[in-house]
Image (cartoon, rainbow, N blue to C red):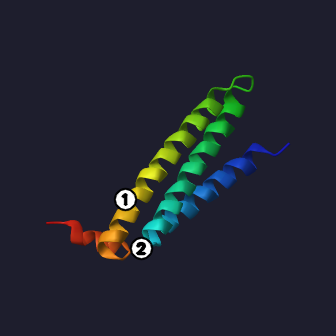
Amino acid sequence: MIRIELLLGLSTLLFFIGFFGFVTRRNLIGMLISVELILNSVDLNFAIFNRILYPGQLDGFFFTLFSIGVSAAETAVAMAIIINVYRNFHSDQVNSINNLKL
């Protein structure tokens, strides 16, 4: 069995990779992927803490499934926005969104 410390370390690593990618990227798709990494880290934490605190119950796993569903809906909406920005400005850079301001 994998030790809990290693799983929490993996979750922390995923979170910080996602955070670093979100802060440093200027590409909208790269930023979306970074947000997905952060959300996957949260899902992993739900499952880990469910296993630690309530080993016989599945509450954390249901929260994880709900969070994955919300992440999928968020990704669909974000992709629609990114496609719309690309169609209007022919660029997928964050700087092109400044043109939307009045």
Q: Spatial distance from mark 1 to mark 2, Cα to Cα?
A: 16 Å
- Residue 19's x, y, as percent? 50, 61
Residue 97: quarter of image: bottom left
Badge 2 crowding class, 10 Å Cα cut-off, few under 14, some 14 to 19, many 20 or more, is some
- Residue 42 pos. (x, y %): 57, 45
> Which x, y percent locates residue 13?
63, 59
Front of the two marks 1 and 2: 1
Question: What is the secondary structure assignment of the residue under circle 2?
Answer: loop
Q: Residue at x 59, y 50 (%)?
A: 40
Along the line of sight, the residue nearer the viewer: 90 or 97: 90
Residue 43 higher or lower than 53, as above or below: below
- Evaluate if marks 1 and 2 touch, with contact meaning CB atoms under 8 Å apart: no
Give the position of the C terminus as an image quadrant: bottom left
**Residue 87 on image: x %, y %:** 34, 70
Quadrant placement of the N terminus:
top right
- Which is nearer the eye, 27 or 73? 73
Horizontally, is 94 left or right of 21 in the view? Answer: left
* Figure check: 62 above or below 43: above
Location of residue 60 with respect to 24 vertically, above or below: above
Residue furthest to the right in view is 1
The amino acid on which the numbered mark 2 sits, given as a three-letter code, is Arg
Give the residue pinned by disc 1: 81
- Which residue is located at x 68 percent, y 53 percent? 9
Classify residue 28 as left or right of residue 54.
left
Residue drawn at 61 percent across, 54 percent down: 12
Sequence-wise first label, 1 or 2? 2
Q: Residue visible at 67% across and 28% down?
A: 53
Q: What residue type is labelled 1?
A: Ile
The residue indicated by pointer 2 is 26
